Image (tube, helix red, strand yellow):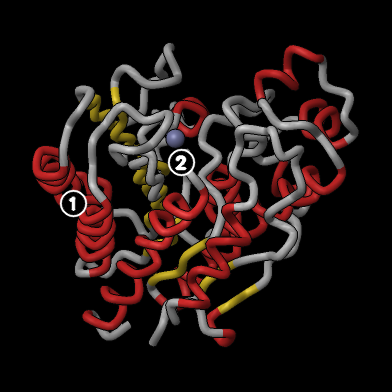
Amino acid sequence: MRPPLVYHQAYSAPLPSSHRFPMAKFRLLHDHLRRHDLARPEQLHEPLPIPRRALELVHNRAYHEGFSQNRLSAADQRRIGLPATRPLVRRSWLAVGGTLLTARLALRHGLACHLAGGTHHAFPAYGSGFCIFNDVAVTARLLLAEGAVTRLMVVDLDVHQGDGTAAIFAAEPRVVTFSAHAASNFPLRKQTSDHDLSLADGLEDDGYLALIGGLLPELLEQARPELVLYNAGVDPHRDDRLGHLALSDTGLLLRDRMVLETCLRRGIPVATVIGGGYDDLAALVARHGLVFRAAAEVGLLLGL
Ligand SMILES: [Zn+2]
């Protein structure tokens, strides 16, 4: 079976063409996956906006209303780095709903992939670094509140620390957070995840894969999660504009395969989100496509 995928055509909200966030990547990723036979129509699921009561399991009302009604202070808006236009507000609510739907599909099918998500710099009362709402945190809190799972783990391999996620779950033993990131990257002031792997600038494929591969099985054995939420950010790539590591395309593909196989062979379902990546659109979109290729391969291999 091919893994279920979650996508909404409103994900690529229009931004001024001069804006440095590559907002078109979601739509282009969808087109790329369709072209490469990695997203057949029967695989695609469309999310609903996250319900307000679910969002409020993480974000306080003053913040989400302030953002959604474009009433945040100029400083708070700048910290996010994206304008609160109506399409952007809509896609922000949809993308959290998308990660939730992806997690539900993963629990049902073993593996599911979101064509967005991974906005891990968002904190309960403010957004930061292009992240408005913390989709993974909202999803984890809701699944726990519903009793759908009793323990889960966030595996965040975006090149930037998952600081919002780490802070949100600092006092939550049912959510184990693991972030592997370049030590020198944003955010300057790191939070404390349950497990932080701080990486040196310029780290290449072999060293990176050995470190992650050496740690992940042990973390899974300790945490025994019933679901892994995997941020497959592609900004550890050597050509990334914001990342400080030096992975190749092959390195990213091997990483994604390794994470998926390590979890799935233990019977732990995985929901993937795409996370960050900053490069020319064509290269970036192909890079985000790697986790979908890994998911198709691993799904086939393990007969999901
Ligand atoms: Zn990042």
What type is the residue that disc 2 sits on?
Asp
Does label 1 point to a residue whose CB lies under 8 Å from ligand 1? no
Across and down, in percent, residue 210 comes to 9, 44
Between marks 1 and 2, how big is the CA–CA gap?
Answer: 36 Å
Q: Residue at x 74, y 59 (%)?
A: 10
Q: Secondary structure at mark 2?
A: loop
Observer able to see residue 151: no
Mark sitting earlier along the chain (1/2) = 1
Image quadrant occupied by the C terminus:
bottom left
What type is the residue that disc 1 sits on?
Glu
Q: Quadrant of ligand 1?
A: top left
Nearer mark to the viewer, of 1 and 2: 2
Q: Residue at x 65, y 53 (%)?
A: 95
- Which residue is at the front of the view, 228 or 278? 278
* Residue position marked by numbered label 1 in the rendering: 221
Vertical comparison of 261 with 80: above or below = below
Question: In terms of image quadrants, where is residue 101?
Answer: bottom right
Q: Residue at x 49, y 77 (%)?
A: 35
Vertical comparison of 76 with 51: above or below = above
Q: Residue at x 22, y 81 (%)?
A: 301
Vertical comparison of 48 with 208: above or below = below
Image quadrant occupied by the N terminus:
bottom left
- Which residue is at the front of the view, 298 or 169? 298
Question: In terms of image quadrants, where is residue 289?
Answer: bottom left
Observer able to see residue 303: yes
Vertical comparison of 74 with 303: above or below = above
Across and down, in percent, residue 70 comes to 87, 30
